[in-house]
Image (cartoon, rainbow, N blue to C red):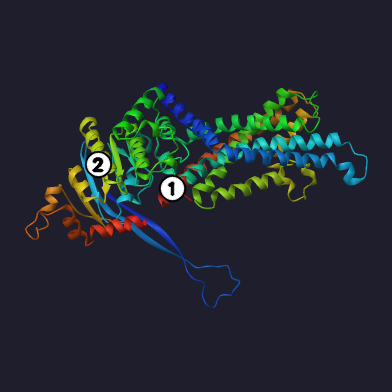
């Protein structure tokens, strides 16, 4: 009986994986545009590092700057894919008008989340690797010193937090049928500003630095630089990995509680009906 | 097994309608503040309803009378302000997952992933309800065939299909999971007569073979008369009459020596003409 329930939930989770793969197939034009945008963004930012000597007129180790910016750009690509894939789990249903059918189905919200997360991680990895492969043709990226295993561990740990943040953001389209999806962009932009993606958080104003330290992205990006640029040993990364998993689990738990309350509110107020 | 499919006790549902008021004359031109007027709209006023297992129960009423609210409450998509709503003994509010496994719904708007094919949309629904693909695939094809859909349409995007064909796929989605309570919210509205007949025949057939209970809201008086065992007429959030189709017809004396129709009953009891109800429906009010 229990195993049948587990199989049913697994089928439910896979429904979201398959649905999202189908969405990519059907909206491949958008995917291509989005990939070109992300790629040119990463290249443009990395070229800033390449041009540092020319900009300042001083002798600068541009390779170090390029690596610094490139790791930041690629990891942000990955984390933002996770964030948007989770936060759009409601927004897609709003756009297509199917939200009532999905909420009426006997699938628990954690199952909904597991399916969306599995897709998000797979999609994020493939997309980031594609960007990395193309960017490698433009810049010489020496990863001979990198701790790849540590980087994978760090990235997975960071994904947990971003799943949690995605759940928080997914609440917005549930609360605000018309504007909710746009609000999630503001959340992503704030994370980009404060998390040391392209510069050390110490360069931020003093009042922003405590906020920067509360962002899980700050630790993921720093940890990834430690692995990929400095080749730090996996054992030395474990405290950060543990911290990220801990923050992630807390953020997910709070996110699920908030989501549950907002879903009940939406059902009381009749907010599931409008397609936005 | 519980013999009561749907048991509604004193259910009340109110919505808050927000309306933006014009800026007061004395306000500054640059003021961005607007007054928002909130108005409570009572959709259902302490409704009581008892639908036994196996019945096709019709709900008739003008638009805005509360029919769709009733269906959404039974679908777990809305929560009542007060009262209780049980489906086969499971409380919709306290035990929604048990309820969700027993029901499915077909609504007037065939909501789908428009770029997906019928097969992709139905497979998504099947997986959500825990159906294995090996079981779901032949079943979905069988239902679509019986509804008169051609196999060539099974794999084309839904956005290329006519409204009638989309609605047939919506009906197929509703029946795919073999619900024991099927909630049909104006399933034939906007369909051409042929498509309407196909859907009605399928509902009739499923009722005979599957022993399902059906809660049907419709503006089609003939459809209600033909399909339903009992009909409730609802107006302004209240049930104003409830009986078998024949029982309802006895409430209204025949005029011009002709037999009383459901349309006569509807007009007499609600004060709305059938055309009014249809027009309101087309405006989407």
Image point (54%, 52%), residue name: A179
> As drawn, is B206 to the left or to the right of B43?
left
Quadrant the N terminus of chain A occupies = top left
Q: Position of residue B186 (x, y in %)?
A: 30, 47
- Dot 1 corresponds to which residue? A272
Are circles 2 and 1 on residues that touch, CB within 8 Å? no
Task: Read off the chain for label 1.
Answer: A
Q: Is residue B2 visible?
A: no
Q: Is residue B46 above or below residue A72?
A: below
Q: CA distance from mark 2 to mark 1?
A: 31 Å
Dot 2 crowding, Cα within 10 Å, few <14, some 14–19, many 20+ = some
Q: Is residue B205 visible?
A: yes
Q: Secondary structure at mark 2?
A: helix
Query: Image quadrant of residue A165?
Result: top right
Image point (42%, 49%), residue name: A273
Q: Residue furthest left?
A: B257
- Mark sitting on residue A206: none
> As drawn, is A165 to the left or to the right of A107?
right
> As drawn, is A58 to the left or to the right of A32?
right
Kindly indicate whether the residues beneath marks 2 and 1 are on one polypeptide chain: no
Q: Nearer the viewer, residue A272 or B228?
A: B228
- Dot 2 corresponds to which residue? B197
Q: Residue furthest bottom?
A: B26
Q: Nearer the viewer, residue A269 or A47?
A: A47
Q: Position of residue B42 (x, y in %)?
A: 33, 58
Image point (30%, 35%), residue name: B148
Image point (41%, 51%), residue name: A270
Q: Is residue B219 above or below residue B156?
A: below
Dot 1 crowding, Cα within 10 Å, few <14, some 14–19, many 20+ = many
């Amino acid at each position: 009986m229990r195993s049948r329930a587990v199989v049913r939930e697994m089928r439910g989770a896979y429904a979201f994986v398959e649905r999202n793969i189908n969405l990519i197939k059907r909206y491949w034009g958008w995917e291509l545009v989005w990939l070109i945008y992300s790629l040119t963004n990463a290249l443009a930012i990395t070229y800033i590092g390449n041009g540092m000597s020319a900009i300042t007129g001083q002798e600068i180790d541009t390779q170090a700057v390029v690596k610094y910016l490139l790791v930041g750009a690629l990891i942000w690509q990955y984390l933002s894919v996770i964030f948007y894939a989770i936060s759009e789990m409601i927004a897609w249903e709003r756009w297509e008008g199917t939200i009532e059918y999905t909420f009426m189905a006997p699938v628990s919200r954690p199952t909904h989340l597991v399916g969306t997360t599995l897709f998000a991680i797979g999609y994020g990895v493939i997309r980031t690797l594609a960007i990395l492969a193309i960017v490698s043709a433009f810049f010489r990226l020496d990863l001979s010193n990198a701790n790849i295993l540590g980087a994978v561990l760090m990235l997975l740990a960071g994904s947990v937090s971003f799943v949690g943040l995605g759940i928080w953001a997914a609440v917005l389209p549930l609360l605000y049928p018309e504007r909710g999806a746009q609000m999630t962009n503001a959340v992503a932009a704030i994370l980009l500003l404060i998390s040391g993606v392209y510069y050390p958080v110490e360069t931020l104003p003093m009042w922003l630095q405590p906020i920067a330290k509360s962002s899980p992205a700050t630790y993921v990006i720093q940890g990834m630089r430690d692995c990929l640029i400095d080749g730090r040993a996996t054992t030395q990364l474990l405290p950060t990995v543990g911290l990220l998993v801990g923050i992630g689990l807390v953020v997910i738990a709070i996110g699920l509680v908030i989501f549950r309350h907002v879903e009940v509110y939406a059902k009381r107020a009749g907010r599931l009906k409008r397609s936005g | 097994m519980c013999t009561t499919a749907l048991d509604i006790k004193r259910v009340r549902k109110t919505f808050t309608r927000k309306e933006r008021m014009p800026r007061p004359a004395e306000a500054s031109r640059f003021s961005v503040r607007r007054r928002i007027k909130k108005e409570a709209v009572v959709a259902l006023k302490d409704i009581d309803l008892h639908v036994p297992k196996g019945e096709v129960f019709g709900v008739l009423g003008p638009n805005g009378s509360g029919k769709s609210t009733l269906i959404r409450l039974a679908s777990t998509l809305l929560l009542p302000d007060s009262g209780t709503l049980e489906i086969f003994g499971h409380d919709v509010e306290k035990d929604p997952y048990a309820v969700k496994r027993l029901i499915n719904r077909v609504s007037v708007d065939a909501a789908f992933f428009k770029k997906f094919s019928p097969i992709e949309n139905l497979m998504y629904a099947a997986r959500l309800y825990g159906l294995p693909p090996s079981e779901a695939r032949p079943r979905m094809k069988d239902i679509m065939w019986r509804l008169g859909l051609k196999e060539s349409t099974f794999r084309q995007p839904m956005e290329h299909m006519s409204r009638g064909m989309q609605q047939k796929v919506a009906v197929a989605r509703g029946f795919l999971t073999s619900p024991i309570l099927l909630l049909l919210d104006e399933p034939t509205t906007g369909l051409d007569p042929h498509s309407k007949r196909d859907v009605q025949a399928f509902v009739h057939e499923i009722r005979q073979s599957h022993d399902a209970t059906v809660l049907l809201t419709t503006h089609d008086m003939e459809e209600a008369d033909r399909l339903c065992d009992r009909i409730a007429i609802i107006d302004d959030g209240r049930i104003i009459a409830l009986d078998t189709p024949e029982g309802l017809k006895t409430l209204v004396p025949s005029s011009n020596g002709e037999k009383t129709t459901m349309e006569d009953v509807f007009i007499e009891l609600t004060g709305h003409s059938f055309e009014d109800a249809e027009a309101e429906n087309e405006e989407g009010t």
